[in-house]
Image (cartoon, rainbow, N blue to C red):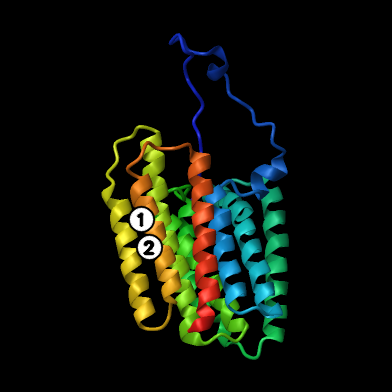
Amino acid sequence: MSISSRPQQRTQGGATSPSTNRPQRSTKPEWKKVAIPSEHGGWSLTLEPVVLGLIASWSIAGLLVGIATLLVFLARTPLKVVLVDRWRDRWLPRTALAAKFAAAELSVVIASMAAAIALADDFGFLAPAAFALPLVAIELWFDMRSKSRRLLPELAGAIGIGAAATVIALAGGLGTKVAYGLWLLVAGRACAALPFVRTQLDRAAQRPVSLVPSDVAQAAVLFVCAVGASQHMVPWAGVVAIGVMAVADWVMVRRPPQRAVLIGAQQSVIGLVVVLADGIAVHSL
């Protein structure tokens, strides 16, 4: 989930601003361009499953998985640069720099996961990661073709990274059914948030947009989480938190649109509330 803004093209008098006619060179250092994620919402959608998994079942192995998860998120940015440049059959100075960042971060991911495996009782906790790999592959496929802003890769990436909650919980010894319930909840939270945010950004930009996708997403996610609670996979407190999120999104999407930064901040707070409610209540199952 990314938030971007477009530069103004005209002055208040209607004349074209001279400064907008010249290419604007970024003052950001090259290493930041290739190494630091620009998707602000991605930080929240990555941290939420990590925090949820650790609250539900704390362990050193789980903490190592959480560190690896954050590094995977960071590594995606330089990896995307490499994939795009190779897809376009080029190798630039920035490509080499990005490759170094990706290699370093992925090396730490491998080391962290190796340590987690050594500390865990068995390899079973890695199963959710295997299930998530096709989703990550879908996201990278779109990344390579510079189409990562579409809804499908955003959903695939968010659902895939949500598997971290289950991996962390299983590494800490949480029961299998409840551990997979964590993934269900964070995946649902992402599937509701992304259509809502896209709708709000379109409204803020005064682009024609339907409220139906956002509304349907809220209702569908609430229904699926309620089914999960009926099967004792998700605590009802988590369902209530999802319900509060759905109502809040339903109301906000009908009010005047807000600035992108405020939309992102609201979603981060909502995500934290959902994670805390579910993570604390999961111990009652």
In terms of secondary structure, where does tag 1 sit?
A: helix
The percent position of residue 20, horizontal first and vertical second, equals: 54, 19
Residue at position x 49%, y 52% from top? 267
Mark 2 lies on residue: 243
Mark 1 lies on residue: 247
Residue at position x 55%, y 74% from top? 280
The percent position of residue 128, horizontal first and vertical second, equals: 51, 78
Q: How many marks?
A: 2
Residue 31 versus residue 131 in the image, above or below: above
In terms of secondary structure, where does tag 2 sit?
A: helix
Q: How far is the residue under mark 2 from the one under mark 1? A: 6 Å
Q: Amino acid at mark 2?
A: Gly
Residue 233 visible in the current orientation: yes
User: In this view of the protein, which residue sits in the foreground, 97 or 188?
Assistant: 188
User: In this view of the protein, which residue sits in the foreground, 75 or 185?
Assistant: 185
Residue 18 versus residue 27 in the image, above or below: above
The percent position of residue 231, horizontal first and vertical second, equals: 36, 83
Which numbered dot is residue 18? none
User: In this view of the protein, which residue sits in the foreground, 79 or 156?
Assistant: 156
Q: Is residue 18 left or right of residue 120?
A: left
Q: Amino acid at mark 1?
A: Val
Q: Is residue 70 left or right of residue 198?
A: right
Residue at position x 37%, y 71% from top? 225
Q: Residues within 10 Å of mark 2 (few under 14, many from 20)?
A: many
Circles 2 and 1: CB distance less than 8 Å?
A: yes
Residue 92 location, quadrant: top right
Residue at position x 35%, y 55% from top? 247
The percent position of residue 64, horizontal first and vertical second, equals: 69, 73
Residue 192 versus residue 19 in the image, above or below: below
Q: Is residue 73 left or right of residue 149?
A: right
Residue 188 visible in the current orientation: no
